[in-house]
Amino acid sequence: MDSTTRPPTDADLLDAYSRAVVSAVETVSPSVVNLEVGNPRNGSDPRRSGPRVGGSGSGFVFTPDGLILTNSHVVHGARAIEVTLQDGRQTQATLVGDDPDTDLAVVRAQAQDLPAARLGDSAPLRPGQLVAAIGNPYGFQCTVTAGVISALGRSLRSRSGRLMDGIIQTDAALNPGNSGGPLVDSRGEVIGVNTAMILPAQGLCFAIPVNTARFVAGRLIKDGRIRRALLGIGGQVVPLSRRISRLHQIPVESGILVLTVEPGSPAERAGLRERDLIVGLDDQPVSGVDDLHRLLTEDRIGKSATLTILHDGEKRVLAITPEESPAAARG
């Protein structure tokens, strides 16, 4: 057999895997930062004294002028934030805004011309895809773990009590301090924001999809918070069969399977039930959680809307009036 056409050996495959991880890490790691948060020492000016450390986490620069994405639970309520860049520089940062409902936050470092990570697209992700997590667990800067996407469309309850849907599950190991760091693909693009692991389980780690993070970050930069409408459900994305889509003329290939309906919520009052499948809001198709989050903007609060669902395979339209999310109302 010609050596140029021989099948790849295990060593070849491992070398290719290593090169993919190394390339992704070299691309993204300059943008990864360590965040130390707390209150000013002795009530003094934090610009001079730095924060009294109350916690730490990770984040990553996504614009050259110093905007950083991280987790809400890392910086929520912080009066002082100190950023350490990969090259060792330290600078103060201010909180632009945070959203506990999606566990995302944006802070601005007092620095310019920073290396910014490229934001990818989380929509085409597939289980089994190679990913790497980069962060600062226990203060060990720029620690890399690699693995695969274990599952998509998971639900995870945020610290605000809201069920976050559409979450990425990965076996790339996370540890305390990894929160807010990037989950990257083999091209070196950020496809998620690392948020949590389940203890004492091993290999159960989660990240917020970058498409959700991109939308939330844009609103936080614009308004400092997200004032969103609420239906009062928890759900996950599931595919629709072609037969069902054609039968009911549904222009999407997936929908949101309702797993929980909160008591006293707009969804309960509208008659929505567990196992119903949401495929539209007003005249807009809904193929997943990101679609619904984008549609449930503040201009829908208190206004009547229609919810298109599949109930036991039958298409129905429910009248529903979204309310303001309590977490958003708290600001």
Image (tube, rainbow, N blue to C red):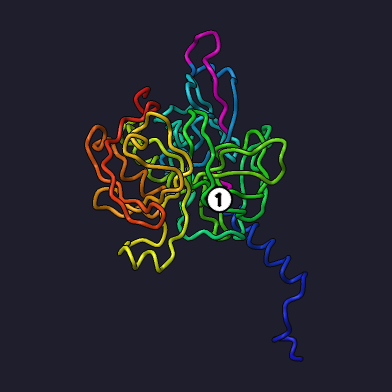
Number of numbered discs overlaid on the protein picture: 1
Is 28 on the left-hand or right-hand side of 258? right
Which residue occupies 47% across, 39% down?
260
Instruction: Determine which quarter of the picture holds residue 56.
Output: top right
Rendering coords of residue 51 (x, y %): 55, 19
Q: Is residue 41 above or below residue 74?
A: above
Q: Position of residue 118 (x, y in %)?
A: 47, 52
Vertical arrangement, residue 5 with respect to residue 314, above or below: below
Q: Secondary structure at mark 1?
A: helix
- Image position of 63 (left or right of 135): left
Label 1: few (<14), some (14–19) or many (≥20) C-alpha neighbours in 10 Å: many
Q: Residue at x 72, y 77 (%)?
A: 8
Q: Residue furthest bottom?
A: 1
Quadrant location, the C terminus: top left
* Quadrant of image for the N terminus: bottom right
Front residue of 188/123: it is 123
Q: The magenta stretch spans which residues? A: 28-45
Mark 1 belongs to which amino acid?
Val
Judging depth in this view, the residue of 45 and 143 nearest the camera is 143
**Disc 1 designates what residue?**
28
Q: Is residue 13 magenta?
A: no
Q: Is residue 108 visible?
A: no
- Residue 35 position, x and y percent, is 56, 31
Above or below — where is 263 with respect to 197? above
Is residue 282 or residue 221 the one in the foreground?
282
* Residue 185 seen: yes
Does 133 sit left or right of 46 as displayed? Answer: right
Q: Residue at x 34, y 38 (%)?
A: 219
Taking the spot 52% from the left edge, 16% from the top edge, the residue there is: 39
Question: Which residue ends up furthest to the top in the rendered image?
Answer: 42
